[in-house]
Amino acid sequence: MKKFKKLFSQFIKFLFVSGIGWLIDFCLYVILTIEFNLKVFYANIFSSIPAISYVFLISTKKIFAKSHRNNLTIIQKYIIYFIYQLLLIFFISIVAQNLYILVREYNLNFKMMKIIIKILVTPVTMTINFFVIKYLAEKL
């Protein structure tokens, strides 16, 4: 039960930090898609980079216990996380772009659709990111 409490507490804190990261990501995404009319795929990639850096740095410093193994430095862990994020963002961006194309085929094309798609993919990526950062911070 104690491990579950710790995990739950970490998850709640991570949601808060990720929420701030998501706001960074979301604001940049809105600017890129609405103001600059960038494709969903590219906007999602460019808007995510500052957000993932923020979430990683705060999470590893404030939420998760440091690994006692000291196998990797924080920079090495960040590089691993960054590469993982690039792969995840690339995959999610393809999914989001295809979802947008699919929705347009059904004549559901309106300005907010790009925003709705961003909101729909967020819970999936946030949950996966929690476990990846936890593993990097506490196990490696």
Image: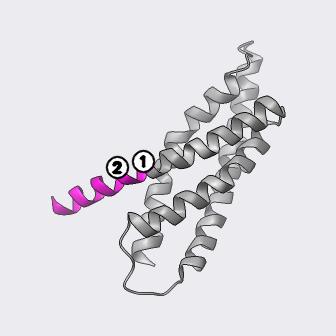
Residue 13 image point, x, y percent: 37, 53
| Residue 36 quadrant | top right
Type of secondary structure dominating the magenta stretch: helix
**Residue matched to label 1:** 16
Q: Residue at x 53, y 63 (%)?
A: 56
* Name of the residue lying farthest toward the top: 107
The magenta segment: 1-16
How many angstroms separate mark 1 from mark 2 (CA)?
Answer: 6 Å
- Foreground pick, 4 / 65: 65
**Rendered image coloring scheme:** one colour
The amino acid type of the residue labelled 2 equals Ile
| Residue 50 quadrant | bottom right
**Residue 2 on the magenta segment:** yes
Left or right, 115 with reference to 65: right
Q: The N terminus is located in which quarter? A: bottom left
Question: Within 10 angstroms of label 1, few (less than 14), some, or many (20 or more) residues?
Answer: few
**Residue 112 on the magenta segment:** no
Secondary structure found at label 1: helix
Residue 3 image point, x, y percent: 22, 63
Residue 70, compared with residue 96, is above or below; it is: below
Residue 114, compared with residue 130, is above or below; it is: above
**Residue matched to label 2:** 12
